[in-house]
Image: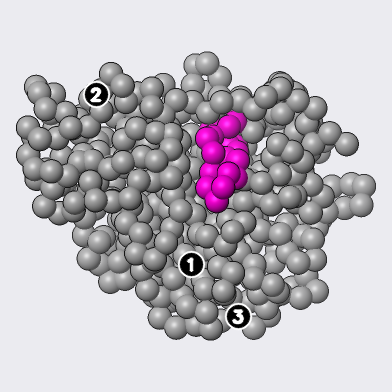
């Protein structure tokens, strides 16, 4: 068992966005969209048709703060939202083959198991303990994959228990790595398994614009791939600052929801060039929702997306790539989808027939909300419809976690569809797991 003192830490996450700049020479040749146009390019998500406010249903024994007073959320018309379970700082989730919900709790070093009750609350038990900040969870048949801060492990799962632990990828960088000396802002890792059995996992950047991550061993700010059957992990996608959202789509393609940088400098020629302007930083760069293919480059920290919401081009970052020599940003393929800067997308999952229309196929994303933007970007659960092998524009599936003054009673992390046709949502600010249920 590892040092239990580590399990009581609060993981430090830099969860916001702001990339920048293009790729064709010096200040006079940079030609992004005007600042007047760009703020509206990543507008707030649209509520689904027929959205309605509901009071969150809370059992009496789960009514501690913030549910010691009524809380309202916005959900699709006719749906209900209830507090299903409470635990401290729940993060990512996966359903077991036998119908239990696994929830990672990095701050406690645990993976919890919730077995739904026939008519009452779920039964909570500890599936795994003594881990180093376990975060990402994924199943491939009866094999469970768990992404710890420093390694990815596989377990055989049967009869509600795990056996035969083995390491799929080890020696991953975290805040104990000697060269980092504790300076690691994105230590938590996510994992997904492709249809061919390849294992993918994220390694976040150590900081906002830490260029040394790109040449580190193993490289950071990457999505890594372990081939089917095992073997050394190799970079699959690069320039991925913090790809916490990692999941396989209905067609077998890998997607990421990626958190961009902060304090991006203004890229347009003129007296404000190279300055950090709050009005520009608040809207740039958009958070990336990207389809990953072998060798995909998402630009960080040399290139930033502009525009949106879909098919976002890149421009160079004037702080890290002022002359376009570090990377040819204009040559990078456009990013497929986005959400507003500093939204902080975390958990990503796909639905493929588990939910009723119009949510039967698409992506669910837990949006944590900004940490330093003014006014704050709102937390929510977003839905992106699946359209012709890609994702349509963002919709708010569950909202109203934030008041007009910017205060919040909750911050969703992840959302997954359950075998009962409901959506289960973790919230590490309210210490809750919600059940979003469609009309009966």
Q: State the residue position of label 2.
A: 34
Cα distance in 3D space between marks 3 and 2: 54 Å
**Part of the protein shown in magenta:** 379-396
Badge 1 crowding class, 10 Å Cα cut-off, few under 14, some 14 to 19, many 20 or more, is: many
Q: Eyeballing the image, is 304 above or below 148?
A: above
Counting residues from the start of the chain, the first of labels 3 and 1 encountered is 3
Q: Determine crowd level at label 2: few under 14, some 14-19, many 20+ residues with C-alpha closer than 10 A.
A: few
Task: Between residue 6 and residue 173, name the one nearer to us.
Answer: 173
> What's the residue at 35%, 28% (across, down)?
283
Q: How is the image coloured?
A: one colour
Q: Residue 52 — which label?
A: none
Picture layout, residue 266 above or below residue 404: below
What residue do we see at 58% from left, 32% from top? 395
- Report the magenta stretch's main SS: strand
Question: In the shown orientation, is residue 411 left or right of residue 124?
Answer: left
Provide the secondary structure element on which disc 2 rests.
loop
Relative placement, left or right, of 367 versus 431 is left
Q: Identify the residue shown where x is 22% and y is 48%.
A: 329
Q: Quadrant of the N terminus?
A: bottom right
Instruction: Establish if 129 lies above or below 103.
Output: below
Which of the two labelled residues, at mark 3 and mark 2, occupies the earlier sequence position? 2
| 383 inside magenta stretch | yes
The image quadrant where one finds the C terminus is top right
């Amino acid at each position: 068992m590892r040092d239990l003192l580590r399990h009581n830490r609060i993981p430090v996450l830099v969860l916001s966005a702001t990339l920048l700049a293009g790729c064709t020479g010096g200040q006079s040749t940079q030609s992004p969209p005007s600042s007047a146009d760009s703020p509206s390019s990543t507008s707030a998500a649209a509520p689904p048709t027929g959205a309605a406010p509901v009071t969150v249903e809370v059992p009496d024994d789960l009514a501690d703060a913030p549910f010691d007073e009524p809380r309202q959320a916005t959900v699709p018309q006719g749906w209900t939202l209830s507090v299903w379970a409470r635990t401290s700082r729940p993060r990512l989730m996966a359903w077991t083959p036998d119908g239990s919900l696994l929830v990672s709790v990095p701050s406690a070093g645990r993976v919890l198991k919730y077995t739904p009750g026939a008519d009452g609350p779920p039964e909570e038990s500890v599936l795994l303990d003594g881990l180093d900040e376990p975060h990402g969870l994924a199943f491939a048949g009866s094999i469970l994959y768990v992404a710890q801060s420093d390694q990815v492990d596989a377990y055989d799962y049967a009869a509600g228990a795990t056996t035969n632990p083995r390491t799929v990828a080890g020696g991953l960088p975290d805040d104990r790595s000697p060269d980092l000396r504790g300076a690691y802002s994105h230590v938590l890792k996510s994992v997904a398994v492709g249809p061919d059995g390849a294992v993918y996992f994220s390694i976040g950047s150590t900081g906002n614009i830490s260029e040394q991550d790109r040449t580190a061993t193993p490289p950071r700010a990457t999505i890594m791939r372990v081939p089917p059957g095992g073997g050394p992990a190799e970079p699959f996608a690069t320039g991925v600052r913090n790809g916490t959202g990692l999941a396989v789509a209905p067609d077998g393609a890998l997607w990421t929801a990626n958190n961009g940088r902060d304090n991006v400098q203004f890229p347009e020629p003129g007296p404000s060039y190279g300055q950090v302007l709050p009005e520009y930083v608040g809207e740039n760069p958009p958070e990336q929702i990207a389809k990953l293919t072998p060798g995909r480059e998402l630009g960080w920290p040399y290139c930033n997306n502009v525009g949106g919401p879909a098919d976002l081009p890149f421009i160079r970052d004037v702080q890290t790539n002022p002359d376009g020599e570090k990377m040819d940003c204009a040559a990078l393929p456009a990013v497929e989808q986005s959400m507003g800067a500093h939204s902080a997308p975390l958990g990503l999952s796909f639905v493929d027939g588990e939910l009723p229309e119009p949510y039967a196929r698409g992506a669910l994303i837990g949006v944590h909300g900004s940490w330093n933007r003014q006014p704050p970007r709102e937390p929510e659960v977003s839905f992106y419809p699946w359209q012709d092998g890609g994702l349509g524009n963002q919709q708010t599936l569950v909202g109203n976690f934030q008041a007009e003054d910017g205060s919040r009673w909750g911050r969703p992390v992840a959302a997954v569809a359950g075998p009962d046709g409901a959506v289960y949502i973790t919230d590490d600010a309210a210490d809750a797991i919600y059940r979003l249920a469609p009309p009966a």
